[in-house]
Image (tube, rainbow, N blue to C red):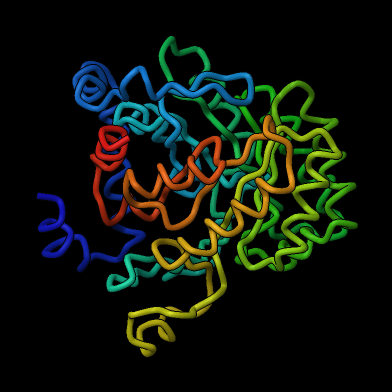
Amino acid sequence: MYPTLFRLVLSRIDPERAHHLAVPVIRLLGVPPFSWITRRLTAPAPSLRTEALGLVFDSPFGVAAGFDKDVRMVQGLWALGFGHVEIGTVTALAQPGNPRPRLFRLIPDRAVINRMGFNNAGAEAAAARLERLRRRRTRPVIGVNIGKSRVVQVEDATADYVRSTRLLAPLADYLVVNVSSPNTPGLRGLQAVDTLRPLLTAVRDAAGETPLLVKIAPDLADDEVQAIARLAVELGLAGLIATNTTLSREGLRTSPEVVAAAGEGGLSGAPLKERAMAVLRLVRAAVPPEFVVISVGGVETAADVRARLDAGATLVQGYTGFLYRGPLWARQINRGL
């Protein structure tokens, strides 16, 4: 039924509004008795349990950052069958993000362009919700993705990340430093190894025992990808997430007029599949076997997830596929695996 619903109804609604309409529904699914019923229908098979980062994941497939920016849908997403939920991106300071419209569907490509700009309620609000979540007896593994506050200058970024880290690391199962979103001015410049080293060192020291990962862009040159991977290993990080959205618009089927009208922002979805796989292989070749690599980008089917796992991913994440596949997406992938 979902493809029909999407074609006739959801595709006609502004995508950000459609997302906000889904939030209360997903939240409701996380509340008993609805969560019990939903989880019975979607629970991953025991054979899919995956150990990584010193944690046990019910499934290797989880939700990428960006879907639940403010820690509102974690339990509902778990009920729908996801093995972990990465919340955020969270910034130290609350911020509204970029002006609307800022989210655009490219339906022929099964893709999305976004320039959300890290809209979120800030680290203190996220910490309060995470604290409540951690008291629950059943919940998914929760990752926390942190980014730079927009009003903070790039030269002051380290202190801004550390502020978020001190609030959120004690409440996270793992922490991710996002230096790869294209929608915050100057952020991607932090991926240069000389700039990234002191930032990751400071966040690592502030994070304490919480596993720390770094998320990189697909638009880096191959040698830059491997340099960051080696740096992450050298600094003792627990892992790396590859990749974020891309600035590329190559090979799209959507009409150039529609793409141009959407404007700037990061592209996610099926067109990212090939580059995300290539970056995964580059990273895996540069790091030891025990180093955790989470692959994200262009994942839509169980075959896509299996291909990433076979290529060396420890875990796999998705986001855009939820929009095109619907609420039983994780169940479909878990059953396929």
Residues 326 and 297: in front is: 297
Relative to 304, residue 16 above or below: below
Q: Position of residue 37 (x, y in %)?
A: 19, 20
Image-based side of 193 in relation to 88, left or right: right
Is 182 on the left-hand or right-hand side of 233? left
* Of residues 188 and 317, the one drawn nearer to the viewer in this rendering: 317
Residue found 90% across the figure and 47% down from its top: 198
Q: Quadrant of the C terminus?
A: top left
**Image position of 133 with respect to 143: above or below:** above
Where is residue 19 drawn, in percent x and y?
33, 52
Image point (76%, 30%), residue name = 166
Q: Residue 311: image x %, image y %?
A: 53, 46
Q: Nearer the viewer, residue 122 or 277?
A: 277
Q: How many marks?
A: 0
> Residue pushed farthest top?
137
Q: In screen coordinates, is 79 left or right of 116?
A: left
Rendered view: 5 above or below 261: above
Task: Please give the name of the residue rendered at 82% of the width and 61% of the height, measured from the top-left corner.
Answer: 192
Residue 143 in picture, x, y percent from top left: 57, 33
**In which quadrant of the rendered view does residue 292 lie?**
top right
Q: Which quadrant would residue 168 be assigned to in this image?
A: top right
Query: Which residue lies at the image location 83% right of the left edge and 46% below the top edge?
Result: 231
